[in-house]
Structure formats: C-alpha cells, structure tokens
Amino acid sequence: MAKPTVLVTGGTGLYGRAIEAVVSRDEKAKEENWVFLSSKDGDLVDRKAVEAIFEKHKPTYVIHLAAKVGGLFHNLRKKVDFYRENTLITDNVMECCRIYGVKKLVSCLSTCIFPDKTTYPINETMVHNGPPHVSNMGYAMAKRMIDVLNHCYKDQYDLDYTSVIPTNIYGPHDNFSIDDGHVIPGLIHKCYIAKRDGTDFVIWGSGSPLRQFIYSEDLAELTLWTLRSYDSIEPIILSVDEAAEVSIKEVAELVAEAMGFEGKLVCDTTKADGQFKKTASNAKLRTLLPDYKFTPMKEGVKKSVDWFVQNYDAAGSDPPPDIVASATLLGHAPSSVLAVSERTSRVESSCK
C-alpha cells in the first residue's frame, strides 16, 4: 500500500522548516511521504500551477502555510497586494484540495485577523466580531476567509478542513529583513549590526506593545498534532500561555543579552507602535493538551540569535519577495520575563 503523502505549502520558510525538523525525528512520519514546497515549485497565485502541483504529488493531506506576509510597515504600504494575492492563493489551494480528494487540510491563520476593538483575551469564537486593525486590513481579511471557507466546504461537500491560529512565531529560517520582516527577526538583525558597528540598538516605537511569542518547532509539533488528532473544523489557537506575554522592549533586551550587545538600547518613538496588545487564550489547546511544555523564551531567543549569526551571509540579506511561509512575528516562561531587567542591566536603555 502506498504511503500517504503530506503536502506542505510554504515549506521552506520559518514555519515549514520547523515542521521539516520535527518530522525528521517523528516515528510516524517515517510511514508518510512528506513534500515541502517552495516558490520554485510553482506560483500559488496561478491556478494552473497549483493544479500541476496537485496532479504531480496527489496529496492525501495538506498543511497550507504559504502566504504573502510581512511586518507592520510592509502591511501598511501594500494592503491591496496582501489582500489580492492571499485571496487567490486560498482559493486555488482549497479548491484543488477538494478536486484532488485531500482527506484533511490544515491552514495557517494569524492573530491579526481578530477584531481591533475587542475584549481580552481573544479566543476562537471572536474571529468575526468586528473589523481587524487598519494597519493590516488587507492581509487579515484575506486570511479570515479561510475560516469562512472551511465552514462552507464542510456544509456543501462534508470536507474536513480546519485552521490553526499561531501567536507570533520566531526561530531559525525567518525573514530577517529589517524593513519587511517581523519584530523578532528584525530586532535580531538590528542588534547584530549595532554590535558589529558599535552603534545604538534602535527599536521602532515605544517598546510598550505586548505580544505572545511561540518558538517555531513548538508550533510545528502542535501542527502535526492538529493534523493527526484535532477533529474540528473550528480554528484552534496555538499559543503559549497568557502569562508569557511580554513587551517588545523586553524582547529587545533578551535579544541584546543573547547577542552579547553591551551598548545603548534606544526606542524611536517617531515610528508607529501598531496594535498595543492582542492577548490570546490557549484554553482550548490546554483542554486538549494540558501538559505540553513550550520552549522557554530565553532559550528560544538564544537559538534564534545563534542561528542568525552563523548564517548571516544568507539570512542577513533580504529574501526574495515571493510566496514565503506564513508567519506572524518566541517562547515562554514568565520567570524569564520577570528577571529580564536584572539579567540585562549592562544594556543602557532610553526606552521608558
């Protein structure tokens, strides 16, 4: 009997590489054929290219990570591009899953899809309760439609398509572009340059916004669990606990410590902060997986910084602006947050 094939779109980005690492040490995966797509395998905006991919691999299962993604300032500048390209990708992948008989589809959403005006913590029932933050309107609305279509495909075709909502992802193989990357890789790149050049480590905004961060391989493990064991079409938030929420300034201090940076940390308050907080509840996940242990934040930041330094020639330059793995912006441990100021006291900071 042929092995089932699991097709991963966006398979060479942050999220996809993490899944590949987890799969490489997973016993059950040895009985499966895993295919990790990159943009070189076809443009997912092009329907004929997507059909060719499905015809070639005939997947049994699909993990859909590919998207046009970017950080706050990229989203602000190109809202129409983010909406149109992500909508086309979603339609092509989901309809090909139906046509080619895929048994289960797991798509990746983002916490930015939640309403801007809401109560906290946010949970899976609140996705469509109001408009998302204006800064990422195009991307967020396009990604919301995945949840809508999951329900539509279930109603019309009785198909089991579901979605995961990670909080901010970080780890090796991220987009470390300072201009168009997400917060954590951007901070790592900036800190590297500041240490190398003997300049200030400047972070954009006040440093006060709060976020939950999840290490990429933790997310990968939970995504495999979703594929194999989560049996609902309703989205599920994959996140560290609420107590692990930290400010951008605290993350910058962790990056500085991991990088061995001893200069001055400066907050550029002429830059926009974006959404102040979007605390997510992982109550559903904890009900189903109460004992899962997340990678501590300090450990995850250190791994990410070390990977970047070791791979600077490749990671330090901007990646091609094509379809990359869907990502949002580390790890865990409230104790690491509480102790951050003490541990990094050698870094002079102008951030309040």
Image: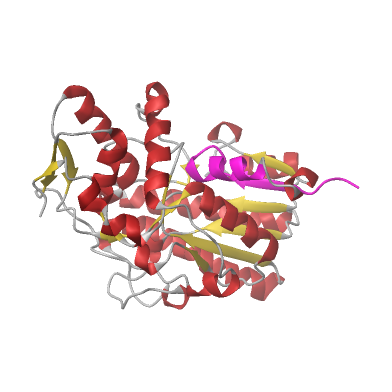
User: Looking at the image, what colour scheme do you see?
Assistant: secondary structure
Does residue 10 appear anywhere in the picture? no
Q: Quadrant of the C terminus?
A: bottom left
Figure label count: 0
Write the residue at 38% across / 73% down.
122
Magenta stretch: residue 9 in it? Answer: yes
Residue 202 drawn at (x, y percent): 16, 39
With 237 as the anchor, is 6 left or right in this view? right
With 228 as the anchor, is 321 left or right in this view? left
Write the residue at 14% across / 48% down.
271
Q: Work out whether residue 154 or residue 92 is closer to the camera in this orientation and state it.
A: 154
In the image, residue 5 above or below residue 103: above
Quarter assignment of residue 273: bottom left
Q: Work out whether residue 169 or residue 328 is closer to the camera in this orientation and state it.
A: 169
Query: Which span of residues is magenta-colored?
Result: 1-23
With 211 as the anchor, is 323 left or right in this view? right
Magenta stretch: residue 135 in it? Answer: no
Residue 330 drawn at (x, y percent): 39, 51
Write the residue at 8% across / 46% down.
350
With 307 as the anchor, is 28 left or right in this view? right
In the image, residue 338 above or below residue 178: below
Residue 198 drawn at (x, y percent): 15, 25
Does residue 196 appear anywhere in the picture? yes
* Farthest residue, direction right: 1
Q: Work out whether residue 18 or residue 177 is closer to the camera in this orientation and state it.
A: 18
Residue 348 drawn at (x, y percent): 11, 42
